[in-house]
Image (tube, helix red, strand yellow):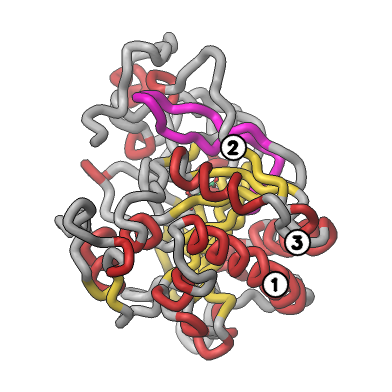
Amino acid sequence: MISSLRDPRCSISSAPPISTILSTNPKPSYITICLPSPPDTRTMEVERVQAISSLAFGLDTIPPEFVRLEEEQPGMTTFHGPVPEIPVADLGGGKGEGAMEAVVKAAEEWGIFQVVNHGIPAKAVKELQRVGREFFELPQAEKEKYAMKEGKIEGYGTKLQKEVKGKKAWVDFLFHNVWPPASIDLAVWPENPPEYRKVNEEYTQHLLIVAENLMKWLSEGLGLEGHALRMALGGDELEYLLKINYYPPCPRPDLALGVVAHTDLSAITILVPNEVPGLQVFRDGCWFDVKYIPNALIIHIGDQIEILSNGRYKSVLHRTTVSKEKTRMSWPVFIAPPPEKIIGPLSELLNDKNPANFKSKKFKDYQYCKINKLPQ
Ligand SMILES: O=C(O)CCC(=O)C(=O)O
């Protein structure tokens, strides 16, 4: 159980007091974008972090709603010292010989690991990154065509969760399903750059193989048949949701967060980062930076695998920091059950000595409680 996100072993930076920042910030916290959209001309007020970042260029302050509470601020809570490295599993070019043991151990002990030699061609990953980056470099009005609609999870947006004390995260994003075909809504897939669709379809085909291998090894690690976890999660109905995170430069990376501390509500997340570090993991009471390994994928065990394994595999608490000069981007794919699927500890794992540690409930109900910060 995590009682505090702050630990005396985590160093404290010499950030100026928040009151100084609040009183000296001359910039508005929003921009107004006029979208000439015939037949009527609408004025839409949006708060995109990318635009706020451009306005803040050269300043030493950020709008107050981006200044995190002290107990969350990276400047106050990041561990500076010898950092334990998260496990790395070599997947043997996708064949996975010898990988199962490393994957299972990492899922039990950390809930996060990197995989190298995973079988996804470097070109497919580079292209995924290129088309995603080019989308975020389009004029704002072009991106707004894909703006997330009320009550929808897919689309281009800025704020996802109900935030404590009205605080905001320094990130814009684009969400869309990539698998299975029946879940795909191409209306939220960017038309620009023109290769966006082809590149995402190709990356997804490679990703499916990695995901299925991971589920197989994790099932075998529980002493079950290789298909056990995949079937318990919905089999062919498993949903793959891509998110592109765009974290623009931030004048005060010591005070802001990209994505706030959370565990993923998915089963597994497979993430491609760019070369700008920023992912942090909470372990032994401290926040540690995750090292960037070129061409590696980062795997997060999510809540649904933790539940199915009755807690044997751990879903990992993580967050992201931002950079003063560089844009960080990441491409997580959240692999999750269909909404109606009931997820609970697998009955094969339960007995008198190992009773269920989690409730069984429909994934959509779990998701609702998590997003609205309600007890499960
Ligand atoms: O950008 C990252 O490395 C992590 C992103 C993440 O945790 C999220 O989008 O939920």
Label of residue 200 in the image: 1
SS of the residue under disc 3: loop
Q: As drawn, which residue projects farthest toward the top?
A: 14
Indicate yes or no whether the magenta region holds residue 290: yes
Residue 192 in sight here:
no
**Mark sitting earlier along the chain (1/3):** 3
Q: Residue at x 41, y 74 (%)?
A: 233
Q: What percent of the width, then of the height, locates residue 145?
A: 55, 75
In depth, the one of 206 and 13 nearer the eye is 206
- Mark 2 to mark 3: distance in Å? 19 Å
Total tally of numbered discs in the picture:
3
Label of residue 95 in the image: 3
1 or 3: mark nearer the eye: 3
Relative to 138, 310 lies left or right: left
Looking at the rendered structure, the kind of residue marked 3 is Lys
Q: Are marks 2 and 1 in contact (CB under 8 Å)?
A: no
Q: Which residues are magenta?
A: 272-292
Q: Please give the residue where the numbered disc 2 appears in the rendered image.
A: 87
In depth, the one of 207 and 14 nearer the eye is 207
Looking at the rendered structure, the kind of residue marked 2 is Pro
Indicate yes or no whether the magenta region holds residue 197: no
Q: Is mark 2 within 8 Å of ligand 1?
A: no
Q: Residue at x 46, y 84 (%)?
A: 40
| Circle 1 residues within 10 Å: few <14, some 14–19, many ≥20 | many
Q: Are marks 2 and 3 in contact (CB under 8 Å)?
A: no
Looking at the rendered structure, the kind of residue marked 1 is Asn
